[in-house]
Amino acid sequence: MPSLSVDGARTRAAALSVQSYDVDLDLTQGERTFGSTTIVRFAATEPTSWVDVKPDELLSVTLNGEPVDVAGLNDGRLELTGLQAENELVVVASMAYTHDGEGIHRAVDAADGLVYTYGMSFLDAAPRVFACFDQPDLKAPYRVKVTAPTEWLVLGNGAATQVSPGRWELAETMPLSTYFVTIVAGPYHQITDEHDGIPLSVVARQSLKEALDREAADIFRVTKQAFDEYHRMFGYRYPFGEYHQAFVPEFNAGAMENPGCVTFRDPMVFRSAATDQERSNRARTIVHEMAHQWFGDTVTMKWWNDLWLNESFAEYMAHRVSTAATDYQDNWIDFAYIRKWWGLQADQRTSTHPVAADPVKDALASLDDFDGISYAKGAAVLKQLANYLGDDIFLAGVIAHIRAAEFGNATFGDLLAKWTEAGAADIDTWAQNWLRTPGLDTITAVRTPDGIKLRRTAPAQFPAQRPHKLTVGGYDADGNATIVDVVVDADEVDVPLDASTLVVIPDTGDDTWAKIRLDADSLTNLTAVLPKITDGVTRAVVLNSVRDSTADGELDPNLAFDILLEMLAGEASDIGIGTMSDWARTHILGGYLPYEENRARLEKVLADRLPDLPAGSSLQLAVVRAYARQSADVERLQGWLSGVAVPDGVTMDADLRWLVLLQLARLGAIGDAEIDAELTRDASSEGREHATRCRAALPTAAAKEKAWSLIMTNGDLSNYELDAACEGFWHPAQRELTAPYVDRYFAEIPGTEKLRSGWVVASSASRGFPRFEIEERVVARATDLVADESVAAGIRRSVGDRADDVKRALAVRAAYGV
């Protein structure tokens, strides 16, 4: 059965009005399945419709007291006939636990054997938990009951009360879309708090108890600060009662905004030393999911094409509110280096799409567009809009939108109307150019005899007239800046800077969405001047320009690598160190440039910094990690594992030990015995994932074949272990060993769709792609696979995106004779 189409959703929404759900889940039935009984009360104006349910076994269905033939279930849909004006549907099913992070995910903690479950109902996963009319615009209140082992804690969207041993009842919720419904059930460790009348808690696995006890104060502090700021901004109180934040095992996304019970990936409860960037990222994730409680949860899109607006808004607010209200102040640096770069790449691939797409795609195809454009580009555009309109108009429109559609559904057009009412002029033209047209402009600094100009060039295939409000910086030899405001509302505008300025940087504040290009003189002077530019956002703008112009074949990758090494030699930001050393690892080394000789140059720069870094600092940890990923110094790395010559201030904790062990595995300096010994030392779920990654990285035929079997044939592998196997498999120094697997990838990856479902199908196709095989045959094989419509859409999308990266690397090599 095809995924739900927008026409099908509109037809059903016009015919049905859902009044309530009563869901009763029994989590005591064994390791494989759980019981699910759903009572749906709804009104109907048509005699026929269907309910969505994806059971292991459909046991019984009654409609208005009459039995419905369960044999009528067809690929997740059960037709309903004889509907009356008012109806009661009762569905009893046995549902399967999952290992792919969707439905009710069941995980066993390797540390102690304890079992944990949680619900992830996003997109089309809700019918794997309960019978429902699964589309975002059929909201209803939920009453949920859960039977669980007596030692378990149960949380959900409504306040949970244990009414008898192992029996829990959750308070009725406000109207929710099906994709927000969750439960979190297991022997979780819980810490409680309260703020401004809102009960708070955080939970995690028992094996993370010590870490959660240590981290809870920071999590609660950020949560309270964000609540205060949102209440101030919106003048509308959080409406969903209690607020639980559950850090759950093997979670696919960063987090999910379930009203009242947000779920997060539990690596955010740091069991080992964490950088400032990792802590600020956790804070932004908390603030992002809280933004959804208003924009997404209180007001929800009618169809998936407007999901971008939920995510773009929350992404923008995460950075804005974290900066305004929390102790973390590196948010826009992170946005520029990481989030924006993610979106810039997505917006230049063949799979690019408008931020605000027309509602023509079905539900699963809409998920394929859930990418860096939906998050980062949309957030950047909203930031530009707030700057363009002024904050008063911007926020007034948002507040009016929330109040007008509270606990209901709305469209992007509804929000545009509210901005217009608030005073925005010609907002539809702005939206057409920025949000309904894909692609991005290039803004180039040009020196002329008369001074400096900025040139705006729209992509030929996506013409648009996009205004850019930004700043331009002129820098002297000491890194001192002259900053001027510029509105780029024509294809060429003058900039009041002297033409003799050493370095000219457009968009110094990273205020717009565009490809930024420096002129030739600025590039020549950059290695000398960049180390003296102290503003982290401006440095990120420059380095994004270097990355992007290199990928476009406009900048010699050798010069780009020189700039990168000069930057790393003096970089004071852990974000900059981590991001740019990762770019070298994933794109430069073995991609644009030969691997070994350039790896050695990067290793030397990082090694030279080790003695002089502040002991115990976040910067030191970032450099140590980057060095461990690039070092070929087996003696030093093995010494660190033994506690020999470890830099002062560095703790060889579990995760750092595994990082060093991974590099030793890639170098062939250890084998299974050493990995087994480390796994004995760290017998946790995290340790098991690390061990899987290390085994996949071993440079032996047997190790590669074993890892390949896990990726391509093991349907029971947890999603995290699958990711680890994919990440460890390919490496530019092991190309000869992995060469036979290139053709096997294209032959076998389509079959993985039968082993797994949802998010993990596409992510494993992306992570498992032979990305260091920079060859025309890889592009040809990928092109053939993408054209094969019998292959799952998510796999084709991932393969196409990775092939675009290979094509760009081929073009760079050809242009510069690499």
Image (cartoon, helix red, strand yellow):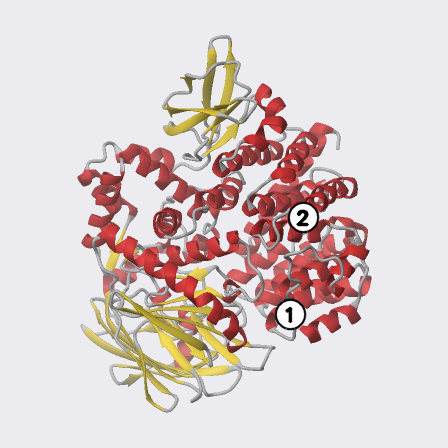
**What residue is drawn where x is 25% and y is 44%?**
395
Above or below: residue 815 compared with residue 611: above
**What residue is drawn where x is 37% and y is 29%?**
469
In the picture provided, is 289 more to the left or to the right than 664? Answer: left
**What residue is drawn where x is 71% and y is 54%?**
730
Q: Which residue type does callout 2 highlight?
A: Arg
**What residue is drawn where x is 69% and y is 38%?**
592
Disc 1 target residue: 687
SS class of the residue under badge 1?
helix
Q: CA distance from mark 2 to mark 1?
A: 26 Å
**Nearer the N terminus, badge 2 or badge 1?**
1
Which callout, 2 or 1, points to the residue nearer the camera? 1
SS class of the residue under badge 2?
loop
**Within-10-Å neighbours for mark 1: few <14, some 14–19, many 20+:** many
Indicate the position of residue 219 as horizontal and vertical percent values.
42, 63
User: Is residue 783 visible in this depiction of the protein?
Assistant: no
C-beta proximity under 8 Å, tags 2 and 1: no
Instruction: Looking at the picture, tell me which residue is in the foreground, 314 or 580.
Output: 580
Disc 2 target residue: 771
Instruction: Looking at the picture, tell me which residue is in the foreground, 99 or 46.
Output: 99
